[in-house]
């Protein structure tokens, strides 16, 4: 079992509490739609060469398939160990010492109605020879609505402005840059915020990371409720499946979180829960 210091334990506790609140909020939406869908939670141990189960930490994969949420995964993990030498060179603070600790929450929701946007959110705390927070959230509508985009960004602007007036424009630009599919020359959605390597005062950076989680809970459920009863056409569904194909391409080719999980012995089902249940390519 991984021994946690005070900061590591505090960060883990927040991510796990946020997971519970998000899952409860999503299940409540399913109830409003007349569905009894609920999250199925499956604990897992990190698997890597040279460690026995439990020594490298693990996590809990949570998945729900319902009437509104066609497939949503909300995962938490707390892992530690040693990076492979070549991979260590790519990680902040691990160039000279490959030992690491990571705890965080990762969420991806694919919706049954093409008028309801898919969404991604994750926040994390990593320890190498440095300590930092990272994460963000982005909205991914197959059929964009300006009102939804504006509300989503407003919530994250407010979260950023409460901590540093420079954060929103910086982290919005970072998201625009990061959530881009170069081989398609398109963004995978309408953006949000993305931040990484946020070092310095632990309490302040954790407070900001908490604000990011709160912004997600403020912004996304109302957007779902606004759109979940909207009628759709066959053309709308075709557009959603093609858009999901682009989303899958990004996550398999460019997403850092996918690579980190695969390189550190994460749970395969948890890592790939971001992939949509149905998609198409044309």
Image (spheres, helix red, strand yellow):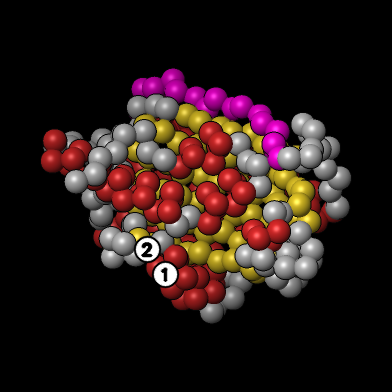
Circle 2 is placed at which residue position?
180
Measuring 39% from the left and 53% from the top, which residue is drawn there? 250
Q: Is residue 125 above or below residue 229?
A: below
Q: Is residue 39 above or below residue 261?
A: above
Q: Nearer the viewer, residue 156 or 110?
A: 110
Dot 2: element: strand
Q: Give the crowd class for mark 2: few <14, some 14-19, many >=20 residues within 10 Å.
A: some
Q: Is residue 22 visible?
A: no
Dot 1: element: helix
Q: Position of residue 256 (x, y in %)?
A: 53, 56
Q: Is residue 207 above or below residue 260?
A: below
Circle 1 is placed at which residue position?
177
Q: Give the crowd class for mark 1: few <14, some 14-19, many >=20 residues within 10 Å.
A: few
Measuring 70% from the left and 33% from the top, which residue is drawn there? 45
The question of residue 93 being in magenta is answered with: no
Q: Position of residue 216 (x, y in %)?
A: 50, 52
The question of residue 47 being in magenta is answered with: yes
Q: Quadrant of the N terminus?
A: top right
Measuring 48% from the left and 38% from the top, which residue is drawn there? 273
Q: Nearer the viewer, residue 161 or 59?
A: 59
Which residues, given as a range, are shown in magenta?
Answer: 32-48
């Amino acid at each position: 079992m991984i021994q946690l210091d005070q900061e590591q334990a505090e960060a883990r506790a927040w991510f796990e509490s946020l997971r519970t609140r998000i899952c409860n909020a999503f299940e409540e939406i399913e109830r409003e739609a007349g569905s009894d869908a609920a999250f199925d939670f499956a604990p897992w141990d990190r698997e890597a060469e040279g460690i026995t189960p439990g020594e490298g930490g693990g996590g809990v994969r949570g998945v729900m398939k319902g009437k509104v949420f066609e497939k949503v995964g909300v995962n938490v993990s707390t892992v530690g160990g040693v990076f492979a030498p070549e991979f260590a060179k790519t990680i902040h603070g691990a160039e000279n010492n490959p030992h690491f600790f990571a705890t965080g929450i990762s969420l991806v929701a694919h919706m049954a109605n093409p008028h309801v946007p898919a969404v991604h959110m994750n926040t994390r705390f990593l320890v190498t020879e440095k300590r930092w927070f990272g994460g963000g959230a982005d909205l991914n509508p197959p059929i964009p609505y300006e009102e939804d985009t504006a509300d989503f960004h407003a919530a994250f602007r407010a979260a950023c402005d409460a901590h540093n007036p420079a954060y929103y424009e910086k982290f919005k630009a970072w998201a625009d840059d990061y959530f881009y599919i170069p081989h398609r020359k398109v963004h995978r959605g309408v953006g949000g915020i993305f931040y990484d390597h946020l070092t310095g005062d632990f309490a302040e950076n954790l407070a900001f990371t908490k604000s990011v989680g709160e912004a997600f809970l403020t912004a996304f459920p109302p957007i779902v409720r606004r759109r979940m009863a909207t009628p759709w056409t066959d053309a709308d569904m075709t557009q959603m499946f093609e858009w999901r194909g682009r989303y899958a391409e990004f996550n398999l080719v460019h997403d850092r979180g996918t690579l980190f999980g695969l390189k550190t012995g994460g749970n395969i089902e948890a890592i790939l829960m971001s992939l949509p249940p149905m998609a198409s390519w044309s």
